[in-house]
Structure formats: structure tokens, C-alpha cells
Amino acid sequence: MKVIICGAGRVGYGIAERLSEEGNDVSVIDTQPSLISAITDTLDVSGVVGHGAHPEVLAKAGADQADMLIAVTLFDEINMVACQVAHSLFNVPTKIARIRAQSYLAPEYSDLFSRDDMPIDVTISPEVEVGKMVLRRISFPGATDVVRFADDRIVMVAIECMEDCPVVETPLKQLSELFPDLNATVTGIFSNGKLTVPNSSDQLHSGDLAYVVCDKGHVRRTLALFGHEEQEAARIVIAGGGNIGYFVAKTIEDYQPKTRLKIIESDRERAVVVADKLRNAVVLHGSALDQKMLLQADIQDADLIVALTNNDQINILGSVMAKRLGCKQNLVLINDPSYQGFTKTLGIDASINPRAVTISGILQHVRKGRIRSVYAVQKGSAEVIEAEALETSPLVGKPLREIELPPGIRIGAIYRDKAVIRPDGNTKIKAKDRVVLFAAAAAVRHVEQLFRVSIQYF
């Protein structure tokens, strides 16, 4: 597949890295020669220095032969015009644009991005996607990652196995026998820096991170089984009243009105705007690094601080300070992946990487076959995928024990007739079932083949 990426920043680099590793023909456009030089020196991609919306630049990048254009520059308008030019002049079939300004995405303007108006097939809003991720983490305390699939009926939770975790040193098959009514399946294990797709004889150990796919109604019981019985936060302090912080606060006000919210915002004008828009939240003007400000926000009584400023250092240090002052838990937005390796040692309970969230949203539309949703974990080492089974799929009609899945794939749950099924050896997948599975990066192409309309792999 020929893909053009406009924007060689963190998100553009991450997408180029994933797609080039999978053998796609990738061209990257950016106005900064240093970024193009860095990406072409480290990845198997071609680079073009120029404006991503200019016709001659797109032509130089091979737009006349492109299957897809992904516009992820820092400017919404450039992304939008790049898609328009790619459509009007080069007839590029699929156009994806990152759109950050929420005014473009307002429901009353939903017809803006259509083939007859602004021909963008998919819009990705990092602020909204990250905000949703924050809300999911708040809803399931104890989980280090939470993603929903199949009309929100199936949930993937990443759970750290603590020293007193009751499920460690027990074969996974035995766990299924011990808890037959628990609709949950361990699909991936991150241990000692390595991600593996387990089989039924493997065991979890203290310190491991388990990726568990389960029925939404069984998430809290699953967390408790892993030794996590943290209560949902009733008092929350949000550091940062930008687009993400406001989105999170507004959603909490709408759906969890009993939660007591306080927001710390460093920009006075923005603080006033947010205070006017919210009904009950207390908005304070100041820095999350100011101990007096944290105490004014009653951080010592808070259950959770959520740090969502644009500055990683403020998010990390402010959250560490908050815990020292008595806050029970923290959740931190971290843009620079180099910081994520040592957050645990600093006292960070959980972090969110907006780049990873955005890339996952885009990969969903890059994948071939009936792929409905994709979420990348551990810097792309594996993906959690929701796919729809077709009549022609080799998965359909046979008991799973008779199907030899390619290595690196483990099925976590099946969604059929609004019910969640935990798979076992006797389970038969039917056409139109939605299958949620865990796949190592090297196995993703096999997943695409399993769920394609025309199966050529088998």
C-alpha cells in the first residue's frame, strides 16, 4: 500500500514507523528539513521537504499513486486542505486528518466532512480520544490501561500483578477452572521488558502486566481477583484546563455529578473561560507546581490528581508533589515517551501517551479486512483488535481447538447477539461474530488475512 503522511512530528513518525515495518511504501512530507532528515535516516521511508497542502509537493511524494493520505501536521487547516487537494487533483481513495479545534467537530456541523464538501474520510481528534481514555482510567481504578470494544460491551484492561496478587504462579488454564463464571481471558503478558502472547500453560508472576479481555460487567471483579480493589475517586483535582482537561471535567459533571472537582489552570483568561462553562467545578488560577496552590485545592484530601497540562515536567513533578502532600493516586499525561520508562520509580501510578492513542485511532483505518477497532500496546509490540468474522473466514464453523491459529494470536472474547462469550476449545465462531483478540506485531498481517473478504493466505 502506498501511503503519504503529512507531518513528521511525533505522531507522523510513529505512524510511519509502524507502516514501514509492515512493508508499506511510505512517503513523509514536512516543512522542516531536520525532521525529514531524521525520519529518512532511521526508517525505510522516503521524505519530501515542503508544504503538505501544496499540489507540487504532493505530486513529488507520489500522490497520483497513493492509496491513502494521513495528514497529522500541527495545523488543522493544513490537514484539511491537504485532504481536499489529494481528493480533487489526485483522487486519493482514503484521506485521514487530525483535527484539534473542537469547533470543526461540533454536531451541528457534522456535514462539513463529506465527499461533497470537505472530502475527509476519517477525522481524528487527539483531545477527545485522550479525554475518553482519561475517563476510562478514572472509571476503573487499579487498571493501568483501559480500552472498550464491541459497543462498549467488551473491555481490555491492563493490570499489574502485585506481590499479594492471588492469581500469580497459577497456570492460566487453572484460573479458568477456578473461576468458571468469570468472563475474562488473559491475552497478553508484559514481563521483564518483553511482551508475550501466552498459552494456557503459562503463568503470571509478581510484577507482570497482564492484558485481560473481559465482559464489561466483570471488570471490577477481575481487578479484585488481581488484588486491585481501589475505590472510584470521589474527589478529583485536574491540573490543566485546556481542551482535554475541560472535556474530562465537563463529562464528569454530566455523568458523575456527585464527584467533587477542582481544576488548576495557569492561564488566567483560560481559567475564567473554563469556570464560566462548568457548573459545579471549582477553578483555581495558578501552577500545579505551587505547593500552596495544591493545598488550596485540598490536594491532601483528594482521591486522584489528573495532570493534563501541555508540559510533561509540570505533569510529572506536580503529580509527585501531590502524592507527597497526601493525594491517594495520580494519572499523568506524558507526551515524550522517553519519560515513561522511569515514571514508576518517581511515584507515578498511571500515565497516558497521547501519541499512542492517536496512532491507534489511525491504525484502525489502515488495517485490511473487517477490522472494526485497533489499539496498540507497548509501543506497538502488539495490538488489541476487534474484527468481524465473515462466511469465508477459516475461523468460522469449527471448534477453536481444531483451528491452528498463527503464532502470536490469542482470542479474548466473542460478541454475538449482544452477548459476550468467553472462548474455549469447544467454541465455534459464527459469521458476523465480532472477535476481540490480542496479536503480536508480527502476527497482525495474519489477522488481516483471517478477516478479509477473500482469503488467500490459507
Image (cartoon, grey):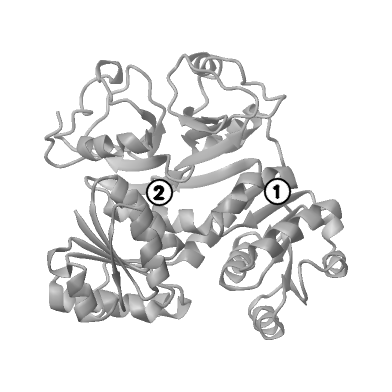
Task: Please name whichever residue, 451 or 48, is drawn nearer the observer in this view of the structure.
Answer: 48
Q: Is residue 377 above or below residue 38?
A: above
Location of residue 420 with respect to 32 vertically, above or below: above
163 to the left or right of 421: right
The count of marks equals 2
- Residue under label 1, please give it: 348
List the single residue furthest toward the bottom. Answer: 269
Q: Quadrant of residue 236?
A: bottom right
- What is the x, y in percent for residue 142? 65, 41
Q: Say the numbered circle drawn on residue 372.
A: none
Circle 2: element type: loop
Left or right: residue 267 versus residue 47 is: right
Vertical comparison of 448 with 32: above or below: above
Q: Which residue sits at x=84%, y=52%?
A: 324
Residue 20, how many percent across, how many down? 29, 50
Spatial distance from mark 2 to mark 1, Cα to Cα?
31 Å
Amino acid residing under circle 1: Ile
**Residue highlighted by disc 2:** 151
List x then y, in percent, for residue 60.
19, 72
Residue at left offset 86%, top offset 55%: 325
Q: Position of residue 131 (x, y in %)?
A: 54, 61
Q: Which of labels 2 and 1 is toward the front? A: 1
Q: Residues within 10 Å of mark 2 (few under 14, many from 20)?
A: few
Lower position in the chain sequence, tag 2 or tag 1? 2
Amino acid tagged 2:
Asp
Q: Is residue 352 visible?
A: no
Asked whether disc 2 touches disc 1, contact meaning CB atoms under 8 Å apart, the reply is: no
Q: Quadrant of residue 68?
A: bottom left
Q: Secondary structure at mark 1?
A: loop
Q: Nearer the viewer, residue 55 or 282?
A: 55
